[in-house]
Amino acid sequence: MSRVLIVIGLVITLIGIGWPWLSKLPLGRLPGDIRIERPGFSFYFPLMTSIIVSVVISVVMYLMRKNK
């Protein structure tokens, strides 16, 4: 459990350090993200972004379990 917490802390730190470069990635503006804008109403659901983030997290968790 402590190893998982250390890895999560390191990942959060790396994301914080790399934020200026990560914010330039098109995540959140990908084809497949649902955006509805009407006068007085806007709806945004990042469907494709959610799928990509889910796949990346799944691969990382798989690799962490495989190395045990």
Image (spheres, rainbow, N blue to C red):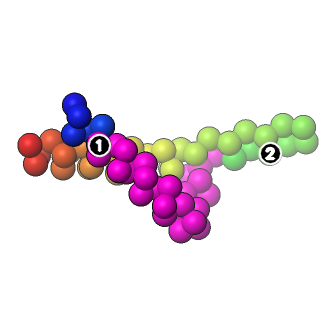
Which amino acid lies under the numbered mark 2 shown in the image of this protein?
Glu
Q: Which residue is mark 1?
A: 6
Residue 1 shown left or right of residue 28 in the figure:
left
Within the magenta stretch, is there residue 54? no
Q: Number of callouts in the render?
A: 2
Q: Are marks 1 and 2 in contact (CB under 8 Å)?
A: no
- Residues 28 and 17: in front is 17
Is residue 38 something one can see in this rendering? Answer: yes
Query: Residue at 51% of width from left, 50% of height from top?
Result: 49
Q: Residue 16, position in %: x, y? A: 50, 55
Residue 2 shown left or right of residue 28 in the figure:
left
| Residue at the extreme top | 1
The numbered mark, 1 or 2, whose residue comes first in the sequence reads 1
Q: Residue 10, position in %: x, y? A: 35, 50
Which residues are drawn in magenta?
6-34
Query: Residue at 62% of width from left, 41% of height from top?
Result: 45
Which amino acid lies under the numbered mark 1 shown in the image of this protein?
Ile
Mark 1–mark 2 distance (CA, rounded to whole Å): 41 Å
Residue 14 shown left or right of residue 34 in the figure:
left
Dot 1 alpha-carbon crowd within 10 angstroms: few under 14, some 14 to 19, many 20 or more: few
Within the magenta stretch, is there residue 27? yes
Q: Nearer the viewer, mark 1 or mark 2?
A: 1
Q: Which residue is mark 2?
A: 37
Which quadrant: the N terminus? top left
SS label for mark 1 = helix
Query: Residue at 29% of width from left, 43% of height from top?
Result: 6
Is residue 26 something one can see in this rendering? Answer: no
Q: Which mark is residue 41?
A: none
Residue 30 shown left or right of residue 52 in the figure:
right
Q: Residue 50, position in %: x, y? A: 48, 44
- Residues 53 and 47: in front is 53
Dot 2 alpha-carbon crowd within 10 angstroms: few under 14, some 14 to 19, many 20 or more: few
